[in-house]
Image (cartoon, helix red, strand yellow):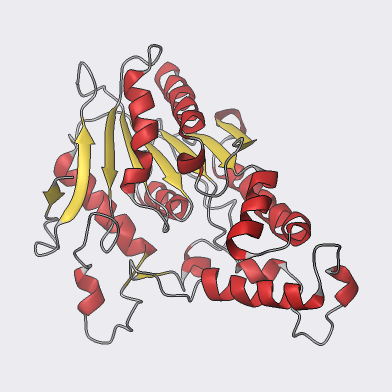
Amino acid sequence: MPFINLPSKPDSPLAYELLDGFNESAHTPLVVFINGLGIPAISWKPTIALLQTSQTLSPKPSILTYDRFGQGATTARDLLDSQPGKDTGYGHDLQDSVNDLHELLQTIAPSERSTTIFVAASIGVHIARLYAHNHPGAIAGLLFLDSNIGNAEFTDFWPNPYASDFNLEDVLADDCSMEQYTEAYTRLGKMFNSDVRNPEGLDRRNVKSLLPDPSKPKLVGPDGRMGPWLTVVGHDPEFFAQENLMMIKVPVSITRKYTQPAWHRYNEALLQISDPERTTGVIFAPNASHFIQKDNPAFVAEQIAMLLQKVQNQ
């Protein structure tokens, strides 16, 4: 990937790749891929290859991928991380990432471009939502892939085994003993709660204050009257449950009873940030866990193509 130095952070090269669409013009759509926390821009490669070789997608969009500071090919740290008073591992937050994305777009993408679409995975959905809210009318379409839950901790959805009102009968199942449940609950918090540090140095502790409600704020599309076209995708519930068991030893019964219903409610609420006639979902991505672009890139490419068609035909 080539590198670019953002004007506000000239000493921190940012890795990006801009692929021009065929018959490039000011009217060529720009599809921007926004990474989650777990996997970098290279994860979009199979999806992009399918878009570029599609026989039905016309015109082909321009495509932008990038790795945030401290992620993937961008080994440079965010300059904000070294400011006095910053705690180690909590150098910059989602709003800072939104500002970086805006500066990147202003630097490399034509200012007269008429159509921009965000494809966002996991915590990247928060960045997409904040960007679209901060820049009304700038985004014509949004594809959300298994958004991270931003208004609660994952352990909030499970009964707290250390609470005085904990009822063991609520969690016991053929695949779940008290010991298994307590271990899974503790492990989940240590891995995924918003105060857990990450290699990127992205401070997630204020996510609940930045985006306290998945159904708000309402977004405005380019026409100034209605919201952007929006497709909300969730993981395959059974595929996700089995992977959770394999990867982090969460009993399938607990995922089915607590995590999955809460996550689905969150995804359903996301549909309210645009107008009903411009929203699609919640769609379950078949044979895909949380990183949908990794598990089923063909499905993601299909959803992007359909979203592009809606945007261009409006």
Which image quadrant is residue 98 in?
Answer: bottom left
Judge by depth and name the residue closer to the eye, 172 or 309: 172
Q: Please name whichever residue, 195 or 292, is drawn nearer the observer in this view of the structure.
A: 292
264 or 184: which is nearer to us?
184
244 to 182, vertically: above or below: above
Q: Is residue 138 visible?
A: no
Q: Which quarter of the image is occupied by the N terminus?
A: top left
Q: Is residue 19 left or right of residue 248?
A: left
Residue at image position (83%, 69%) is: 171
Q: Image quarter for residue 52?
A: top left
Q: Evaluate whether residue 299 shows in this view.
A: yes
Q: x, y (%) of residue 106?
A: 19, 45
Quadrant assignment for the C terminus:
top left
Q: Position of residue 136 (x, y in %)?
A: 38, 44
Number of numbered markers: 0
Q: Position of residue 12 (x, y in %)?
A: 14, 63
The residue under the point 78% across, 58% down is: 253
Give the vertical position of 245 relative to 222 (above or below).
below
Left or right relative to 145: residue 257: right
Q: Residue at x 90, y 72 (%)?
A: 169
